[in-house]
Image (spheres, grey):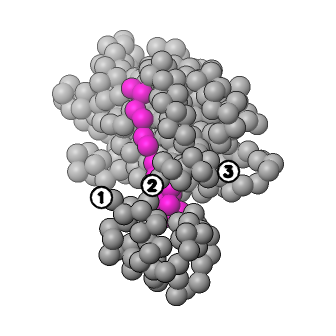
Amino acid sequence: MAATMKDLSRETGLGLATISKYFNGGTVREKNRLLIDAAVKKLHYVPNEVARSLKTQHSRVIGVVIPELSNAFITSIISSMEDILRKKDYAVIVCDCRSDAKREKDAVEFLLHRRVDGLINMATDMTGTHLRSALNAGIPVLLIDRLIDGLRGRVSAVVIDNVHAANQAVRKLTALGHRQIGIILGSPNLYTTNQRLVGYLNALEEAGIRSEEEYIRYGDYTMDGGYQAVLDLLKLKRRPSALFVTNFEMTLGAMLALQHRKLRVPEDLSVIGFDKLELFGEIFPDLTLIRQPQLSIGREAANLMLDLLGGSEKVIHRIVTLSTELTEGHSIRPLREGV
């Protein structure tokens, strides 16, 4: 039979009030703490978290809803975030909605029924309706990577400066003399997709280059999508001399497509990819990349969620915007002499 708090009380000689205070995070005398710790080990006591959550109205569980668990960028963020939350005695439940809006709404409802203290979401449904029940229940909501305009002021967020990231990459290519520059974007209508498209168009305008719709392709943030987008670009009568791919999976797919078509990088096509991950170095070394601060995104998200759970009566929602970095490799070349 599992040990109870009454068993701990008999073993230590301490009152139930002292033991309860200890397990609910209160301060107890050092000698009492040592007695309780020793009794916990001896009796193999496991706290009843369900009972505790009913009493305190806090589960110490954070729900996380993401579009794709197989996405390396997302898993990197989750790992960084979970490290910090666990140190603060919060558990994490991760739900993968497979980039499906209905699954995403169902996942939010599932987590609310599990009485999560907070909700972290990389949104698929950009209307934000899937988060309405959480907000109405007073559950702190934090968005990562993707803002939802209709929820500004009601949620906090951690994002990167997507416009600057794309602008930086395309400016690098225009400075090298490229004028036919293709871009592979994620799913249409997502915040990150739209922001990166704005950065691309701004950079072309700054260089006096007219944007051409045929050079703008969508790869749904998947490897297959990146692969197919490159094949489509290569069918053009005036195919691009340079390419900017806006996430890790699509960059892998794009590079595989170029390999299969026996095109050399950068001799036949200059390429700038996205996300500095170790796997790139193993498969395609020396790529020029826009590097996202995955670990920093996770850390900022965890700390911001802890702030939201801090107990302040008036919650002030913040949007934390992090910078990206262009790391130069050997996957781009100038098109004109002297550059």
> Regarding mark 2 in the picture, which secondary structure is present there?
loop
- For residue 292, side relative to residue 21 (left or right): left
Residue 224 x %, y %: 29, 24
What percent of the width, then of the height, locates residue 230? 33, 23
Give the alpha-carbon distance from disc 2 to disc 1, as whole Å. Answer: 14 Å
Name the residue that disc number 3 marks: 308
Answer above or below: position of 133 versus 90. above
Q: In this view, does 33 lie to the left or right of 261?
A: right
Q: Can residue 49 be seen in this view?
A: yes
- Type of amino acid under label 3: Leu
Earlier residue among tags 2 and 3: 2
Residue placed at 44% from the left, 31% from the top? 67
Residue 48 - label: 2
Q: Magenta segment range? A: 85-98
The quarter holding residue 337 reads top left
Amino acid on which the number 1 mark rests in the picture = Met
Residue at screen point 65% across, 39% down = 139
Q: Is mark 1 on a helix, strand or loop?
A: loop
What residue does disc 1 label? 1
